[in-house]
Amino acid sequence: MMLSVRDLKVSFRTDDGLVRAIDGVSFDLEEGEILGVVGESGSGKTVSLLAVMGLITDPNAVIEGSIRYKGRELVGLPARELRRLRGNEIAMIFQDPMTALTPVYTIGWQIAEQIQAHQRLSRSAALDRVEELLAEVNFPNPREAMSRYPHQLSGGMRQRAVIAMALSCNPALLVADEPTTALDVTVQAGILDLVRKLRATHNSAVVFITHDMGVVSELADRVMVMYAGRIVERGSRSELFNDPSHPYTRALLGSIPPLTGDKPRRLPAIPGSPPSLLRLPKGCAFGPRCPARYEPCDAGKPDLAGGSHAAACFRVAQA
Amino acid sequence: MIYPILRRLGQMLFVMFGISVIVFLIFFATPGADPAARIAGRNAAPEVLEAVRHSFGFDRPLYVQYALMMKKIFITGDLTSFVNRGWKVVPAVLDSIPITLSLVFGAAVLWVVFSIIIGVAAAATRNSWLDRLLMALGLLGISMPVYWLGEVMNLITQSRYHDTWLFSWVPPLGYKNFSDDPKGWFLTLVIPWITLAILYIGIYGRVLRAAIIESMQEDYIRTARAKGLSETRILLRHALRTSLIAFVTLFGLDFGALVGGSALLTEVVFGLQGIGKLTYDALQSLDLPMIMATVMYASMFVVIANAVVDFVYILLDPRVKTS
């Protein structure tokens, strides 16, 4: 097991009391596996992965639980040790390539900076490596692209530069936080191809955060659906897409326009909006929006129940 | 490269022309502004007034007077004072330039170095006692009027504690030429440099702290953390570097204004015959040619300082070049 997260809880101290953004998330990741994490904005998918990276710098954040990477506990690891892993063994790609790069340095400089932070390498050797990396992510003219500043590149090119940077130290684990959301659809397809290719060539495990079910269905081996800081359903891609058991997953899948058959006049939408973490409903957090709600839903929070394909729903547990 | 420089020069000429016309009109053409009456003195006889008017050329059309004055400043350089007739204005301005430049350059070095140290230290230890202490000191520096601070400095270093080992090295007030006596030049300027720099260290330290803290919220800082860089490197190479852009803008404006005569108070307190003091004296006696010459000089420096800032911008921020 490469990454094993157990009962991860992330809370923030605010003026209105302690807000629990992540409430008992557990998942495992094998080498070379692609895990899709799906959910609406604010469902906690980014925060939980930032916690894995040790990138929650808010002094008011409280992180509990266990995050084991290759058997090593990351929660409570000294900053220096964590820094050695970050960018080296665990790399991250962020949502918005427009703002993810420091505007005043060339992309070649920024990628070489990361390589030299982790490897004893001369400047020129690092720059040679940058050229290889940029070629690997399909820059037509890598030598020339290295001397470009971020603002001189298009969004797709920047995202590929960010990916090249993330790959610079051959990470065993790659966390991609909505890497395609800010891009055009055609560019998106290219980036997804790239992620797949990387898994094949580097055998890296990938955690792919997105709110796009279409992207997940193309890419992920296993899928994890999050709602209000909890996992509501997880399973393999085929289990989840062919046989969704949680009402929320079903509703999410129902909101994708079908490619074949009759087009619906209106796509079904999930009524209501995600609950505020400050005022979570008493029972199941999805309860107020759930079409299948009945009495037990108001009584307590359902636990994730089941084997490899599990859902946190009283209806499913009952059936 | 040539084109932007030419454009800058054109801009500078335009600004200086505008300022000279405005200053000229204020003193020569506003209602009640009669330079001849001022020179001749109160209750002067009409014949005397007429004689003065003719002698100074005030009876000629305004545009001729303006053109003559500009010619005397920029071409022949023989504009003379209205107050001390025969005293050439242009050499007086040229003589005072090195004094003001020495004062402002030295102070600028001090304030840039110390405000960067303070701003970075405060931002790095945000909300700690060190941050609060540094910011309180900065506020104190900003709140102290420079003429008061200068007098207090003089009181301490020239009088009360001058005989102690601490300040016995402080020479008497005044300026010594760098070429004649480099050591004396340095020693006479140390106290004025510190006095002038304290205000700006306070302002720049606070501005830089705020800018760094703001850029620490940016996405690219998170990327830098994800790369596994050390906090020091993130602070200095990423956050400070992008924060310097605001710093440089402010610096260009302040530096230009100070070299153009805003260091007046410091110059007066420390007996330095710089541009500010020259302008101040000219205003006291309403010496129009001198005012015109110093204003021309000041506007030239403000425009030059801004041009230098634009150039430094290109070095600091690659986005400027393409847009």
Image (cartoon, grey):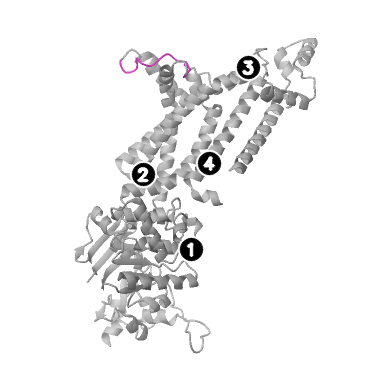
Q: In this view, does A306 lie above or below B291?
A: below
Q: What element carries label 1?
A: helix
Q: Which of the chains bears the disc numbered 1?
A: A
Instruction: Calculate the distance from the C-alpha at mark 2 to the C-alpha at mark 1.
Output: 32 Å
Residue ID for mark 3: B285
The picture places residue B166, in percent across and down from the top left corner, at: 32, 18
| Residue B169 shown in magenta | yes
Residue at far bottom of view: A261
Part of the protein shown in magenta: B165-178
Q: Which of label 2 and label 1 is nearer to you? A: 1
Residue ID for mark 1: A155
Which residue appears at 32% of the width and 65% of the height?
A49
Instruction: Calculate the distance from the C-alpha at mark 4 to the C-alpha at mark 2.
Output: 27 Å
Q: In which quarter of the image is residue B31?
A: top right
Residue ID for mark 2: B123
Instruction: Calculate the distance from the C-alpha at mark 3 to the C-alpha at mark 4.
Output: 39 Å
The picture places residue A296, in percent across and down from the top left corner, at: 29, 81
Residue ID for mark 4: B311
Instruction: Name which of mark 3 and mark 2 comes first in the sequence.
Output: 2
Instruction: Name which of mark 4 and mark 2 comes first in the sequence.
Output: 2
The picture places residue B98, in percent across and down from the top left corner, at: 52, 22
Q: Which of the chains bears the disc numbered 2?
A: B
Looking at numbered disc 2 in the image, what kind of residue is underneath it?
Ala
Looking at numbered disc 4 in the image, what kind of residue is underneath it?
Phe
Q: Which of label 3 and label 1 is nearer to you? A: 1
Q: Is mark 3 on a helix, strand or loop?
A: loop
Q: Which of the chains bears the disc numbered 4?
A: B
- Residue placed most toward the observer, B257 or A32: A32
- Residue placed most toward the observer, A120 or B310: A120
